[in-house]
Image (tube, grey):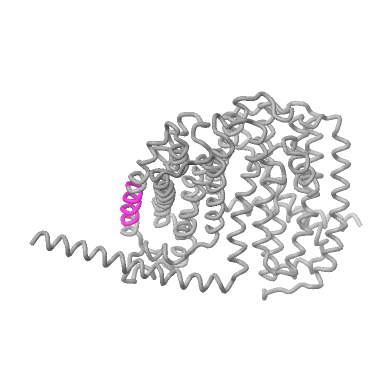
């Protein structure tokens, strides 16, 4: 009997998941139709992020072609770190960019109420509402950097390393999303959550370089408090057979905990939310 | 005659005074911006310290000189602002540009004064950052009076180069009516081309030539080079002369382009 019940619950969960996946597909198709209407903006948006990244990478190249290493990390090893964090960031940028705009676009205008009266989870609705094309540029930069550096470094792609690449990028991406989720909840109180989100988000810039170049305090911050290190430094260390690498396997747990906290906080904020009266 | 000049002066003064008020509206961003700047500066400082871990000079520059240059370039980044391009874009979109063109004030002079006011506000905003750079990252400011004088002259000249260059770029708005793409593209490139991320001396010859063939470095790398002593003070007159030549070139190019472009004006309502 209990077995049967558990089966039913599982079945129900699978059903919900399929329903939401289908819904996401429909939202995405709609969004792509809109984006294709403004094709020039789509291309400009995606390429603008590429130009920004190219600036920083060019600077690293100019400097590192003259020195043997960045505190023991070669040019290509630095590119690997940089590429991994860019890939993780692109997941957040493409699929969860509305966590930035919730206050300015949805709450201030009263558009958020629309989500509350629909028979789907409001958070899902918010995220599915806008696929952000600018993230595609970051994704391409990330793929190019990881590809280029791993070839140059001759990384031996054992199954565990391939798994680490996926685990590192995905848990990194979810860490980005979870931290933006936690901070965006402030929009329910102060409407514009962007300053708060930026305060946390910008710390990912530290993770563009090996954490070992920073003082201990900063690397602890980036590992245990604002754990962007799991998006770049630790998986890269694993791929390069460095000592710090094994801790990278904790990435999925760190991401899961943050997502759990983020979702509970979101629900708490939603309960408090009373609209702006628009 | 005198009263006309006085009237004109007071008009410009009023325009000048509006800018800080607009900035005050974003108080929360002041504090948040400060923290974000400290994060960015910390990354730059630790990155460069790690670069110098195994070597004492790169392209003739020592650690202290490089870090001082990088921090000061960061603080004086507003010199490269491309606000004018954005403002043209939004004025055109909202139809405001018609009123501005019709005002009995020289359109270009009005914009210059506004941009100068914006620059000074932004630099005042950077003062706390200067304080934190000294406090946290041991920034040592140059003390020589003539060094600062050489820097201020060069910074003003560089700002003027950028003004005419932005004026030139902004004229594209008259054709495209949309400036977002161009604006983002320029802002992305400015970081590198102005010399904010790497001293020009460290670039390979071909790259330095390319970077110096566009105007961005005139507004940042050149004045900050004088301030940090990377460019010796005795070179100052030569540096100024090059900047003045840039101004003349950019002034001619932008004036000609504007004359042609303004006839194409299409305002999307307003």
The quarter in which the C terminus of chain A is drawn is: bottom left
* Main secondary structure found in the magenta portion: helix
Q: Position of residue A22 (x, y in %)?
A: 36, 70
Q: Position of residue B220 (x, y in %)?
A: 74, 42
Residue farthest left in this picture: A1
Q: Is residue A164 magenta?
A: no
Q: Is residue A69 above or below residue A56?
A: above
Q: Which residues are magenta?
A: A257-268
Q: Position of residue A15 (x, y in %)?
A: 26, 67
Q: Quadrant of residue B86?
A: bottom right
User: Residue sitting at 39 percent across and 67 percent down?
Assistant: A24
Q: Is residue A258 magenta?
A: yes
Q: Return the residue nearer the eye: A48 or A241.
A: A241
Q: Return the residue nearer the eye: B41 or A82.
A: A82
Q: Return the residue nearer the eye: A174 or B270.
A: A174
Q: Quadrant of residue A102?
A: bottom left
Q: Quadrant of residue A268?
A: bottom left
Q: Return the residue nearer the eye: A204 or A171.
A: A171
Q: Position of residue B57 (x, y in %)?
A: 69, 26
Q: Is residue A157 left or right of residue B175?
A: left
The quarter in which the N terminus of chain A is drawn is: bottom left
Residue farthest bottom in this picture: B269
User: Residue sitting at 38 percent across and 37 percent down?
Assistant: A247
For the image shown, how many numbered marks are present on the structure? 0
Q: Is residue B53 above or below residue A145?
A: above
Q: Is residue A155 above or below residue B141?
A: below
């Amino acid at each position: 009997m209990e077995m049967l019940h558990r089966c039913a619950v599982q079945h129900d969960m699978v059903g919900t998941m399929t329903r939401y996946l289908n819904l996401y597909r429909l939202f995405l198709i709609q969004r792509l139709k809109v984006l294709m209407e403004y094709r020039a903006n789509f291309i400009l948006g995606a390429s603008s992020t590429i130009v920004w990244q190219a600036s920083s990478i060019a600077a690293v190249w100019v400097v590192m072609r003259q020195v043997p290493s960045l505190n023991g990390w070669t040019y290509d090893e630095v590119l690997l770190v940089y590429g991994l964090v860019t890939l993780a960031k692109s997941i957040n940028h493409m699929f969860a960019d509305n966590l930035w705009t919730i206050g300015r676009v949805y709450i201030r205008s009263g558009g958020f109420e629309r989500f509350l009266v629909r028979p789907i989870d409001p958070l899902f609705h918010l995220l599915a509402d806008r696929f952000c094309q600018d993230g595609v540029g970051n994704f391409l930069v990330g793929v190019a950097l990881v590809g280029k550096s791993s070839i140059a470094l001759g990384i031996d792609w054992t199954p565990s390393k391939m798994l680490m690449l996926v685990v590192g990028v995905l848990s990194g991406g979810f860490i980005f999303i979870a931290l933006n989720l936690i901070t965006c909840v402030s929009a329910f109180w102060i409407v514009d959550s962007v300053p708060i989100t930026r305060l946390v988000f910008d710390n990912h810039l530290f993770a563009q370089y090996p954490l070992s170049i920073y003082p201990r305090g900063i690397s602890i911050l980036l590992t245990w408090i604002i754990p962007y290190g799991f998006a770049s430094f630790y998986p890269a260390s694993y791929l390069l057979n460095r000592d710090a690498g094994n801790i990278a396997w904790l990435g999925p747990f760190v991401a899961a905990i943050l997502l759990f906290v983020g979702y509970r906080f979101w629900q708490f904020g939603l309960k408090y939310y009373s609209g702006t009266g628009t | 005659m005198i009263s006309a000049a006085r009237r004109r002066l007071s008009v410009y003064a009023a325009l000048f005074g509006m800018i800080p008020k607009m900035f005050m509206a974003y108080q929360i961003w002041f504090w948040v911006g400060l923290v974000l700047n400290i994060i960015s500066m910390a990354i730059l400082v630790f990155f460069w310290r790690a670069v110098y871990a195994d070597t004492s000079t790169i392209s003739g520059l020592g650690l202290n000189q490089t870090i001082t240059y990088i921090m000061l370039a960061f603080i004086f980044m507003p010199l490269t602002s491309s606000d004018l391009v954005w403002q043209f874009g939004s004025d055109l979109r909202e139809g405001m540009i018609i009123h501005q063109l019709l005002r009995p004030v020289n359109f270009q002079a009005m914009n210059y004064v506004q941009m100068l006011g914006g620059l000074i506000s932004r630099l005042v905003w950077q003062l706390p950052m200067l304080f934190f750079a000294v406090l946290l990252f041991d920034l040592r400011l140059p003390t020589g009076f003539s060094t600062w004088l050489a820097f201020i002259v060069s910074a003003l000249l560089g700002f003027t180069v950028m003004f005419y260059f932005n004026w030139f770029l902004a004229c594209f708005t008259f054709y495209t009516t949309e400036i977002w793409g161009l604006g983002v593209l320029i802002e992305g490139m400015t970081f590198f081309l102005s010399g904010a991320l790497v001293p020009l001396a460290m670039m390979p010859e071909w790259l330095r030539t390319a970077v110096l063939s566009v105007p961005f470095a005139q507004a940042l790398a050149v004045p900050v080079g004088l301030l940090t002593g990377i460019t010796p003070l005795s070179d100052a007159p030569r540096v100024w002369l090059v900047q003045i030549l840039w101004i003349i070139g950019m002034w001619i190019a932008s004036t000609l382009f504007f004359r042609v472009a303004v006839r194409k004006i299409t305002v999307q309502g307003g």
